[in-house]
Image: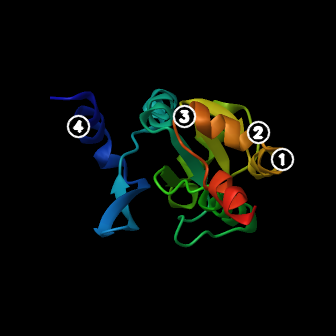
Amino acid sequence: MNNSFRFVARCVRSGSAVYMPRQADPGRLRWAPVRVLCSAADLEKNLGEMVKKDKVVVFMKGTPAQPMCGFSNAVVQILRMHGVDSYAAYNVLDDQDLRQGVKDFSNWPTIPQVYFNGEFVGGCDILLQMHQNGDLVEELKKLGIRSAVLDAEKESK
């Protein structure tokens, strides 16, 4: 049994949801809830696994399809602008333990929180600053993701 399956099987009982992209139609993604979080005792360990599972992970209020706060919406829009459509998004409004646990895990007091390859990047303000100064393009490149902003700049010249 692989680790991901074992992780999900162990954690499905807690009832928190993660929203993962699913292929709906060719070229179109939709977000579907998947239950994966465990009890509070396992929360820190599970958060460590969750942030490493995908290249880009966002803990947010709401879902990418329906953000429930302006800062979460801004993160979704910035990622979308860079062509990052495939990432794990965890809705902290579904689980208060997750909401507080991720703040404790990162030692960062606000939501949304963004992780690249398991490393905490920051919140909306940091991601916006990285977008504005060009650092986000470089960080995405390190993840093997070509930013759509590069293509847009090329087309405008």
Residue 150 bears which disc, if any? Answer: none
Q: Amino acid at mark 4?
A: Phe
Residue, x 73% and y 65% (percent of image)? Answer: 156
**In the image, is residue 2 above or below residue 71?**
above
Q: Earlier in the sequence, mark 2 or mark 3?
A: 2
**Mark 4 Cα within 10 Å, few/some/many (few <14, many 20+)?**
few
Residue 1, image x and y in percent? 15, 29
**In the image, is residue 68 above or below residue 108?**
below
Residue, x 61% and y 69% (percent of image)? Answer: 67
Rounded to the nearest whole Å, what is the CA distance between mark 4 and mark 1? 37 Å
Q: Which residue is mark 3?
A: 143
Q: Nearer the viewer, residue 129 or 92?
A: 129
Q: Earlier in the sequence, mark 4 or mark 3?
A: 4
Residue 129, image x and y in percent? 83, 47
Q: Earlier in the sequence, mark 4 or mark 1?
A: 4
Q: Secondary structure at mark 1?
A: helix
Q: Secondary structure at mark 3?
A: loop
Q: Which residue is mark 2?
A: 135
Q: Amino acid at mark 1?
A: Gln
Q: Which residue is mark 1?
A: 129
Q: Nearer the viewer, mark 4 or mark 1?
A: 1
Rounded to the nearest whole Å, what is the CA distance between mark 1 and mark 2? 8 Å
Q: Nearer the viewer, residue 28 or 104?
A: 28
Q: Which residue is mark 4?
A: 5
